[in-house]
Amino acid sequence: MKDRILIVDDDDQLVNAYRDYLSGLGYPVDCTGEIEEAQTLLSHFDYSVVITDLRLSRLNFGGLDLVKFIHEASLPTRVVVLTAYGWPELKAEATNQGVDAFLRKPMRLSDLAKAVDMLSGGNA
Amino acid sequence: MKKSLLETILDPHQLSVRFQPIFRIADGENQIHSVEALIRGPRGTHFESAEVLFDYVRRKREERAVDHSCLAAICAEAVHLPSDLRINVNVHAATLGQSSGFVESFRRRVKKHSLSLDRFTVEIVEHAPTCDIPELSHTIAGLRSAGVRIALDDVGLGHSNYRMMLDCHPEYFKLDAYFVRGLRDDHKRRAVVESVVTFGRALRSSVVAEGAESMEDIAILADMGVEFVQCNVLCAAVTVEELLTTGSVRHASPLFISSREMEKGAAGNVAMLRTGEDPPPFSPNACRWDVRSRMH
């Protein structure tokens, strides 16, 4: 069994696409579109990698709030941030905050899987 | 469009209810005093666990709306309980402290299901420091005048402190399991229990100890003056159907404590629970632990 992945994005279509692809590779996947649900899941269950959109509903940079939450809670979870914006400053900011990978949307699902594989070690 | 988790939780049909009996252990009365209604979240999800569910609800700051949804689910199930069985329901302090209309809406909800308000005990949970104490006191007074009793949950933890004990002046202090587990071998925990029992006596409040893990601990609690216990050793949280069949209550009741178990236990009030060396055949008339015997 591979490590568990949490996908946080409020775009249902994208979430379904990520989930189906990663599930097909053998990853158990949970999904949510809101930061409070993500925080709750991270507090009670073990996730190897979180894939989060930078912009979550209501919050322009909700993805970074989630990164902050993970680090404040000292969770070992690695973070992939997805964004439609590609500003170098944003990428630098995300890296400063401890983001492990930064992918620009739209990206190939295989690139997402590659990042997840690398961060999770690809297995349990 | 897919329903959000919160929208799902706000539908009472998505919640399920378990009931855990609270047993009176003082004075050898040996019977179920009441049941605590415990909510489970949407089935088959990570939020089925109450701990996870209410963590999410508090993060969303939606305690008030979800409390009402939970009360709706509980009342719908409670109609199947024996009509003289008391029911404890959990309500956030934030709900009681922010909602001047709580008493009236609770009254309407209970009436809709032809239940009687004076069967209910409201357990105040998660006493947030920002809670409006005057409004909370006002709501508590309204509940009391309607015949509802008050319990303070998680005594000893978080914000369930001396101020809350004084301001709410509950009929029941529910002592958190943290202070009860391993009581036999821990004089510091016994000291905490003693202090709460003493304080309870001064306020004429009863103490309910949660989470005892053995009959020995229950015997010690009885000797220390604790009046009620609620723990899986006696009966886990079960569905209303399970509660009403003899199975779960019989299985967990002290009627089934082996003689060896009783000998291990401390002498005292719990010795009165002994009804025989072996589990006796079930008899609704003789078995006061059995919920069915309370049905009219």
Image (cartoon, grey):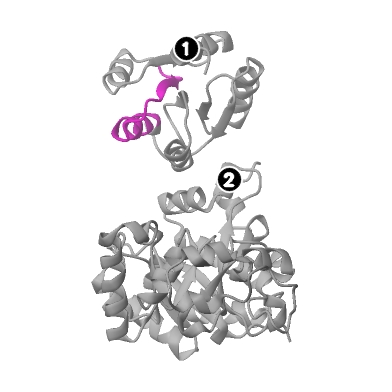
Identify the amino acid type marked 1.
Gly
Q: Position of residue A115 (x, y in %)?
A: 47, 11
Mark number, residue B4: 2
Amino acid type indicated by mark 2: Ser
Quadrant in which the C terminus of chain B appears: bottom right
* Residue B126 visible: yes
A107 and A39: which is toward the camera: A39
The part of the chain drawn in magenta is: A63-85
Q: Position of residue B198 (x, y in %)?
A: 27, 79
Coordinates of residue B37 in the picture (x, y in percent) = 57, 67
Q: Is residue B135 above or below residue A12?
A: below
Q: Residue at x 63, y 14 (%)?
A: A25
Q: Residues within 10 Å of mark 1 (few under 14, many from 20)?
A: few
- Residue at 40% of width from left, 15% of height from top? A102
Residue drawn at x 38%, y 33% as measured from the top left: A66
Image quarter hosting the N terminus of chain B: top right
Residue A121 marker: 1
Residue B9 sits in quarter: bottom right
In the figure, B68 relative to B200: above or below? above
